[in-house]
Image (cartoon, rainbow, N blue to C red):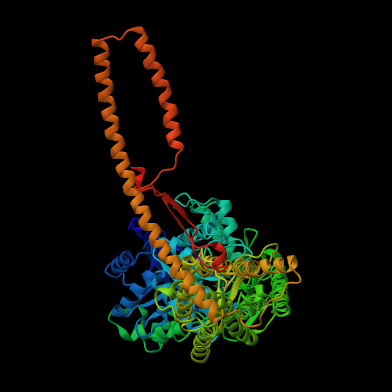
Amino acid sequence: MKAWPWVWTWAWVVAGMTAGKDRLLNIGGIFPIGGSDGWQGGQACQPSAMLAMEDVNSRPDLLPGYKLNLAWNDSLCEPGLGAAVMYDLLYNQPTKLMLLGGCSTVCTTIGEAAKMWNLVVLSYGSSSPALSDRQRFPTFFRTHPSATVHNPTRIKIMQKYNWSRVAILQQAEEVFISTVEDLELRCKDANIEIVTRQSFLTDPTDAVRNLKRQDARIVVGLFYVNAARRVLCEIYKNSLYGKSHVWFFIGWYEDNWFENHLQEENLNCTKSEMRAAAEGHLTTEALMWNKDNEKTISGMTAGDFRRRLNQALIDQGYENQSTPVGYQEAPLAYDAVWSVALALNKTMETLAVVNRSIEEFTYTNKEIADELYKAMNATQFLGVSGRVAFSNDGDRIAWTQVEQMIEGRYHKLGYFDVQTDNLTWFNREQWMGGKVPQDRTIVRRQLRTVSLGLFISMCTISGVGAIWAFLLLIFTFVHRHRRLIQLSHPACNNITLIGIMLCLGSIFLLGLDGQFVGKQQFQVVCGLRAWCLSLGFTLAYGAMFSKIWRVHRLTTKTKIDSKVRVEPWKLYVMVGVMVVVDIVVLGVWQGVDPLQRTLEVFPLEVPKNTVEDVKIKPELEHCESRHNTIWLGLLYGYKGLLLIFGLFLAYETRSIKLKQINDSRLVGMSIYNVVVLCLITAPVTLVISAQQDASFAFVSFAIIFCCFLSMALVFVPKIIEVRHHPGERVEYQGDGAPSKEEEERYQKLMRENEDMQRLIAEKEEKIRLLKLKLQERAAIRSREKQQQQQQQQQQQQQQQPPPQQQQQQAENHISMPCQTEAMAQQPRLRQGGQPAVRIVTPDAASAPEDAMVPRISYDISESYL
């Protein structure tokens, strides 16, 4: 309200100048000049309107007999204050014929209320699309085009550069909300994806960060200039500028808006940082300056008007190099005053036909108000902002210009005519890096595969192992008649070798991936992997398990049923049952829920040694089914039980060596090796499954190590033995099963062994008891001896013997040890003179080779006590 004294002073001066000559036609003006938020375009629009008042009142053919008078005040771009200014204007004389307004938020308030006073409102600085609603704002016009006029231009530019993915950042104001809603509809019609829509009230920090998370490259920003500075600072902090990003800003900011008021608004960005973030951005704005150097209705060209406006701003205290807010919209305010004058002039002509006067207008006179509305709606002229005309919604029909910030200055790139859908382009755009930015990060899918060197090396080693296993099969066949081979169950050994070859072959299948086979073939590979590795493990480990199980049975069955024999065919049946279980499980798995090719997607990576705006999307192939966990759990559980049971049997028979299976200890060591590596490999591969090289190398190494070590333990001793005894052959041909006589002899020796062990245990217990008695006897003798020594000392003290007697006693004392030694050399006899008992086990020559009969001897003398 501080401007009111100046306003009324201006009105009084104008009235004094025209007193006695012309009468006044009063209009009201609401200009947003001060304040910290919103648009303060009245700083340049108010002086521009005053220039128009001078030019209108200097025209004798316009408003004959009348002078136009403007009463105004500052609204600070606040709706509440704007409403208060309007009420002051309306409730203070003289009557206002029309209202001029600026700032969308204020015009929304006064435009909706003006119909109550039958007033036409003409805005020079309101772009809110909501103001185009004739139901809500029936008497509203504007020389400033609607914000939606930019949207067709933005869409046209996006189509020109093939941008089909954009983001929107808006300030939470009605003008921008309605603009965004219109933009979304147009983008949908043009098949342009809006990846995200972010809004903020005062602080854009989080909204800008969200844009970065969404990989927004083309961003449309809609906010007032003070918010635009905060946004630009956050753009710099989040690196959302440069060759990879394009920002669309509103074009009605002043030219150096990004460098002004940084300290006043407490922005922690320097001018150089703001300049760097602003470089390359695009603006779209309705054409506000006549681009042709031709005279307008005022007799001036746009250049003439610019010079007059610059001088007026200098007179008001603005420096030569500084342009106030609203400088771009100043021609709109100038043409708005001319639109009011032409509409009033047209209305006066219409009323004169019916002998009425414009001075009869009151806030309740709807007839004159309707004439004013019709005259304004029909107004057309060439102004300093271009061709001025209004649509049925009261919007300005205008072209749109596109500009780009290049090296800190705006350069015109072209114009767009919405009515003809014609884009005039000058090809002056400049892009960092020399190429048009992309609307998204180009993501190149990259399949992670096993490195070729690792694959070849592992396949080579496994191939060598498979060849070795095949040679061992030949070796077993060639020397099948040897006793050494016969007693090691050659059939089980052959099954083990076949399983090893399958396991080693699975390494080749595990390394096959997208670099060798296609998608369809990969699914076949998935099934082969499961069958080959599972059956190979079952054959190799199952054969060793059956052998160690037979060892355990042979050493324990005498305690259960000595007449039952462990037939060799039972071993083959055991392995066959394991294979059948595998076939059933794998068959049901592949039939119900087959393994398929799935892709594991990793976070985007920046490629090395490239300048392109490209990121790599790593993918890794896996063989999985819908219920993969259930099937793996079933297989792991079944084979895990076999591993644990095999480990138990190997431990129980660790010190047993049988003639029927001469390599049982070596088989047990192989089982230890398999169990340990399987328990380590299975969980580790689940953890490192995302690392294809590490996973393949770890699994391959475990398979190779198990297979090579098992072959070495089981077959190398046989090869060495054959080399040392090349001519030895077995005496009989068969499967290594013992004869009936050998079996009976073995059982007899086992019984004798058990009886002898029981007898030895009894004797050891008796010896222990005897030792205890000896210890007690020795303790008693020690005490008695001490007592005798004490008595002797006392007697010696009482009577001392003569020297000759002492010498005789000494001689007798010396002869006693000799007698004791002679007695010790005599054999100890039982009572009755019989010698001590000696317990000896059966002669080793009479026992079979592998009979577990201890050979122990004890000398026990009861007369020792």
- Examine the image and state in which quarter residue 365 appears: bottom left
Q: Residue furthest bottom?
A: 591
344 up-or-down from 864: above or below: below
837 up-or-down from 342: above or below: above
Number of numbered markers: 0
Q: On the picture, is 188 further left or further right than 795?
A: right
Out of 207 and 562, give the one closest to the viewer.
Answer: 562
Determine the residue positioned at 75% across, 67% down. Answer: 723
515 up-or-down from 688: above or below: below
> Residue 797 at x, y = what percent?
26, 11
- Examine the image and state in which quarter residue 602 appears: bottom right
> Residue 564 at x, y = what percent?
45, 82
Q: Quadrant of the C terminus?
A: top left
Q: Quadrant of the N terminus?
A: bottom left
Residue 251 can be seen, yes or no: no
Q: Residue furthest front?
A: 832
> Residue 189 at x, y = what percent?
52, 87
93 up-or-down from 357: above or below: above
Residue 855 can be seen, yes or no: yes
> Residue 492 at x, y = what percent?
60, 79
Determine the residue positioned at 42% across, 49% down. Answer: 835
